[in-house]
Image: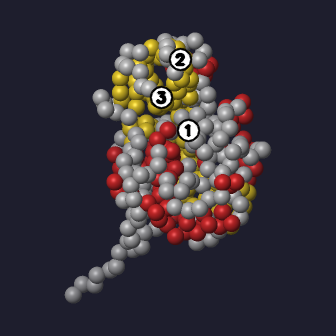
Amino acid sequence: MRSFSLGDFDFALPPELIAQHPAAERSGSRLLDGRGDGATDRGFRDLPALLQPGDLLVFNDTQVVKARLFGEKRTGGKLELLVERVLGGQEVVAHMKVSKRPPLGTTVRMHGGFTATLLGRYPGENGPLFRFGFSGDPYTLMEQHGHVPLPPYITHADTAEDARRYQTVFARNPGAVAAPTAALHFDEQVLAELEARGIRRASVTLHVGAGTFQPVKTEDIAQHRMHSEWYEVPEATQQAIADLRARGGRLVAVGTTTVRTLESWARSGLARGDTDIFITPGFAFRQVDVLLTNFHLPKSTLLMLVSALAGYEQVMALYRHAIAQGYRFFSYGDAMLLERRLAPASPTIAAC
């Protein structure tokens, strides 16, 4: 098998194809059917007809929180926090953007009237993130005073539309700072059509962190270290997958976060915990048969993941097709449907 470097996952994307707003209706997006070696242009509402009765769709039910918070130091300097994780009680872990980092113990007044006290680094003394103690319940304060943490390639300030549409219709476990974007296309009508066709549903949770946008900085992708995210595979989902395997059905993962959750569980045997799994071409999938996903950034770990599942040449050909046909890219963009490409069988050695 060939080896891959960072440059293999680069492509030129016209800026006008980066979707700045969602489609007028959730299921009004386009869907590029990239199963096998093909490339068929469809609409997202075609999805139920493309799946088989007995398939199991697995969603990520994480809920995006209004994790972007603003404040001012006593000196008047501006400070911005992006809450990555709530540790318990009133303590959080956050990215901090500030011109001059305040010393430990500094209490900052945040917009909305609450305070945040800098407690230390995370996960260790030299960690890249910071621990803060809030003056109230973090989830309540974020909901009341926070902003939707839109991705860096969306250029407008968050609005009421973003609060509604940068969230899935089945989000229920708060903790993500980025949406599981492949699931944003689903509305009640599509879900009802899937159920009527005999396509079953289950859910996992992976709280997507800001590290999902972290660029790969090494040409040798094997040197890249993934951010860590918390996940859970509930017992009901474990049973649904066992039933699926017993009847010979296909597991359809909705989004790369679902893939990372299921494959982390398959490898570790742990149904909940932290994962920093990095999926690149050559990865042996144990759970996922079909993937529904959005279009991802050049040189991103997510592009590497979909290339691992569907085959590098096929995925890059699909991206060229999508650009030529004017598909909308990234979080608010269109979707694509991929099948896992089976590894070629090992050659048989005849007995002497």
Q: Which residue is pictured at 69% across the width and 58% down the height?
A: 327
79 or 286, which lies in front?
79
Furthest residue toward front: 75
Is 206 positioned to the left or the right of 21 in the image?
left
CA distance separating discs 2 and 1: 30 Å
Outermost residue toward the left in this view: 352
Residue 269 horizontal side relative to residue 108, left or right: left
The earlier-in-sequence mark between 3 and 2 is 2
45 or 224: nearer the eye?
224
Callout 1: 10 Å neighbours few (<14), some, many (20+)?
many
Query: Alpha carbon of mark 1 to alpha carbon of mark 3: how far?
Result: 25 Å
**Relative image position of residue 108 (x, y in whole percent):** 48, 16
Q: Quadrant of residue 5?
A: bottom left
Q: Amino acid at mark 3?
A: Ser
In this figure, which residue is indicated by the disc labeled 2? 76
Q: Which sits earlier in the primary sequence, circle 2 or circle 1? A: 2
Q: Give the residue pinned by disc 3.
A: 99
Nearer-N-terminus badge (1/3): 3
Quadrant where the C terminus is found in the figure: bottom left
Number of callouts: 3
Q: Which residue is mark 1?
A: 178
> Label 2 sits on what residue type?
Gly
Image height of 115 relative to 241, above or below: above
Residue drawn at (59%, 62%), measured in percent from left and top? Answer: 12
* Number of other residues with Cα within 10 Å of mark 2, as a class: few under 14, some 14 to 19, many 20 or more: few
Residue type at mark 1: give it.
Ala
Numbered disc 1: secondary structure: loop
In the picture, the quarter occupied by the N terminus is: bottom left
- Viewer-nearest residue: 53 or 175: 175
Q: Position of residue 326 (x, y in %)?
A: 71, 60
Residue 133 placed where, x, y %?
43, 17
